[in-house]
Image (cartoon, grey):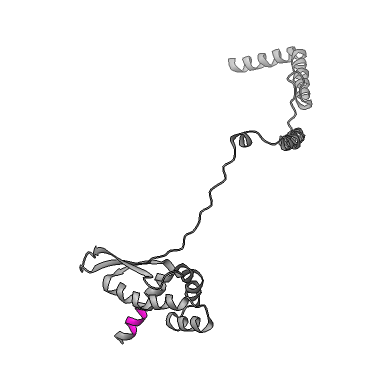
Amino acid sequence: MMGARRKATLINMTKSLFEHERIETIGARAKEIRRVAEPLITLSKTDTVTARRRAYAVLGDRDVVGRLFKEIAPLFKNRTSGYTRIIPIGFRRGDGASMAILELTEKTVVAKLPKKKKDAKEASAPDVKDAKEAAPETPKKAAEEKKEARKEEPKIKHIPKSKQMPDEGRKHEKAKSEDKKAADNKGFMKNLRGLFRKRGDR
């Protein structure tokens, strides 16, 4: 059972090495991974169907096998050995195990394209064509925006103070007619006051 676990660990670590080109592990384990990885790199130099099948029998991953034959093998065309290096990095805190970095001696370089810098003149001065095209559109847009604003505004009728509403005019006329009637009936009001005084005397 321990033999199967050990084998699976070494295969997984080898796949990680081919994927990332650099791993960190215990020093003793790094030496065992090297024993698995270097023969596979030698095998990948001859890109044939049988070589790919033998690599797949060990790794069991089509993507890793494809990367091994297409990307990693061309890096070591001029080498016959020394495909990996082990760099000790000290002891692990806790159990004191000696740690190391296992990496490929040749690595894929990703070329970064420089960003194109625009000239200051081109950036500051816009094209004449764009300015001509943009000029006639601005007054049209302004007129449309004004029309929309007018539609959205609520319509309120302002009534001048001098003009009175019809109902108020009628009320005013009624009040005047009542005042006239009261003025005409002054004698009647005097008679009523006399009656109330007589009752008070009683």
**Relative to 84, 113 lies left or right:** right
| Vertical relation: 88 (above or below) 1 | above
**Relative to 34, 111 lies left or right:** right
Residue that appears at 74% across and 16% down = 179
Q: Position of residue 160 (x, y in %)?
A: 75, 21
Whether residue 131 is visible to the viewer of this picture, yes or no, is: yes
**Relative to 73, 92 lies left or right:** left
Q: Quadrant of the C terminus?
A: top right
| Prevalent SS, magenta region | helix
Q: Which residues are magenta?
A: 4-9
Residue that appears at 76% across and 32% down = 139
Residue that appears at 46% across and 80% down = 55
Q: Position of residue 115 (x, y in %)?
A: 54, 47
| Vertical relation: 185 (above or below) 146 | above
* Quarter location, residue 35: bottom left
Check if residue 51 falls in the magenta segment.
Answer: no
Whether residue 202 is visible to the viewer of this picture, yes or no, is: no
| Vertical relation: 55 (above or below) 75 | below
Check if residue 6 falls in the magenta segment.
Answer: yes
